[in-house]
Amino acid sequence: MFAFSAEPIDVALLTSQLARPEAGACITFEGWVRNHNQGQGVLRLEYEAYEPLAVKEGELILGEAMRKFNVCDAHCVHRVGSLEIGDTAVWVGVTAAHRDEAYRASRYIIDEIKARVPIWKKEHYARGDSGWVNCEQSGSATA
């Protein structure tokens, strides 16, 4: 499941949806909005996505991770809209029989999402200006 949300991500709910009796490991990743990027103070972010293509590509990435790393389940939710410092911008959850597969799948998913999914962010800087950047190209104001 890959999805976008204009509302805050409910991490506890999403994590609970990953429970599987065959899973011995659950790895979750949260990317948070931080207050700086590439030497500049950041006040907030805005995310936009081309959702029809982004959801399709996100689902492909999750499927790849499930096959490649033999995981039980994998989900990802990315925020769109305006986010404040400390907000969760992206959440990835993976369950697998063993921790190694879960860790590797989680890393694969977030790296591929940043590289392949059409998501852009507008950084609002402390000095008063702002700029749009593709998530992969920026130092990313999320973790």
Image (tube, rainbow, N blue to C red):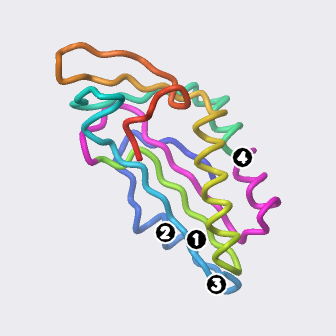
Q: Check disc 1 and report the residue beneath it.
A: 18
Q: Amino acid at mark 4?
A: Ile
Please tell me whether mark 4 or mark 1 is closer to you in this view: 4
On screen, residue 14 versus residue 64, left or right, reads left
Residue holding disc 4: 61
Where residue 131 appears, x then y in whole percent?
36, 15
Classify 10 Å Cα crowding around label 4: few (below 14), some (14-19), many (20 and above).
many
Q: Earlier in the sequence, mark 4 or mark 3?
A: 3
Q: In the rendered structure, which amino acid carries the disc numbered 3?
A: Gly
Between circles 1 and 3, the one closer to the viewer is 3
Is 124 in the magenta?
no
Question: In the image, which residues are magenta?
Answer: 60-86
80 within the magenta span: yes
| Label 4–label 3 contact, CB within 8 A | no
Query: In the figure, residue 21 lies in which quadrant?
Result: bottom right
Relative to 39, residue 13 above or below? below
**Which residue is at a point 47% across and 28% down the rendered structure image?**
138
Query: Badge 2, how many Cα within 10 Å: few under 14, some, many 20+?
Result: some
Q: Quick one: SS at disc 3?
A: loop
Q: In the image, which disc is placed on residue 24?
A: 3
Q: Is residue 60 left or right of residue 135?
A: right
Pick whichever of labels 2 and 4 is earlier in the sequence: 2
Q: Earlier in the sequence, mark 4 or mark 1?
A: 1
Q: Residue at x 67, y 62 (%)?
A: 104
Which element carries disc 4, helix, strand or loop?
helix
